[in-house]
Image: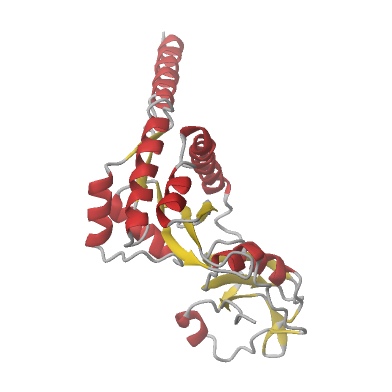
Amino acid sequence: MKFRLVLVILFVTLCAARAGASEARPLTLAVLDMGGSPTAERVAERLSKVVGSIVRTDGRVTLLDRGMSRAAARGVGYAGSLNMTLAEARALGAAVGCDFFITGDAQTLRRSSSTRPVYYESYATLFFVSAQTGRLAFWLRPTAEADTAESAETALLDKFTATVFGPYVGIVAETAEREERERFSSDEGAGAAVIDLSTDEGAASNKDLREPAPYRRLRPAYTDAAARAEAEATVDAVVEIGADGVVADVRVVRWAGFDLDQEVVATVKRMHFRPAQRDGEPVAVRVLLRYNFRKPPKS
């Protein structure tokens, strides 16, 4: 009788687990402001409509009310920063109450060149950000050019279609699944022996330690994507350096987009360090490296 009771309880538990999995709440996505220009307002409105039409047929994601999302973001002082730390992005997402948010910048600018005296460019820089981790999931920068400002903006808005943005909504859902797997598979005990110098508190409590130094300083390149956008940003990376001076891990904690984050990670991984030392013995440490990117002067 006891065995049968155990089987019944197990069956009910499995059924409840399956029901819970099938009824898992959809991810919440918010569209925030894209700046203060008229183009920015129209881009945000068009993006909201397009994403709304997509999520109505995709049960994995739901779109939050844009007015409420904007009010919540403004309520915590968000002024459109596009160069956030993970902590800032998580705090913003928590205030809005979303799993992911889209923010960015959109403008229509008057341009000129030697081959085209006067023309107009409309662009929209879109950052898709995970509110759970604070990480930049991916970024887009559609652009359009025309002889008039109105025509350039119209051409840009015409690129905001369900066909174009449908796959990106899918990527948001896939990113959430990957982050969930990472969260459960992370080894909580890993790195326990590493001395953390990446914070002010850690550096202050380890003043007796000689910090690591690179044998050769490498400078991450200013990427083509950043050059096209004339982007200026700072990328912060927390780097774990082993007792052998080898870079064991690189994690971006302030992202910039425009492929600058990937450039920083790739560059740091090519570096080799004179290891940190305590009492003459090499030790593994975690440090913060900061790279400031500025657009080069026009020739």
Residue 256, placed above or below residue 49: below
Q: Camera-side residue: 29 or 156?
A: 156
- Residue 95: x percent and y percent? 28, 55
Residue 28, placed above or below residue 72: above
Residue at the image point whose x is 39% and y is 46% from the top: 99
In the rendered view of the protein, which quadrant contains the C terminus? bottom right
- Residue 186: x percent and y percent? 57, 51
Residue at the image point whose x is 61% and y is 79% from the top: 296
- Residue 114: x percent and y percent? 63, 70
Residue at the image point whose x is 32% and y is 57% from the top: 38
* Residue 192 visible in the shown view: no
Q: Camera-side residue: 18 or 14?
A: 18
In the rendered view of the protein, which quadrant contains the N terminus? top left
Q: Camera-side residue: 254 or 285?
A: 254
Image label count? 0
Is 17 positioned to the left or the right of 226 in the image? left
- Residue 164: x percent and y percent? 52, 37
Residue 247, placed above or below residue 279: above
Toward which corner of the image does residue 215 lie, by quadrant?
A: bottom right
* Residue 18 visible in the shown view: yes
User: Coloring scheme of the render?
Assistant: secondary structure
Is 130 positioned to the left or the right of 113 in the image? left
Is 45 positioned to the left or the right of 239 in the image? left
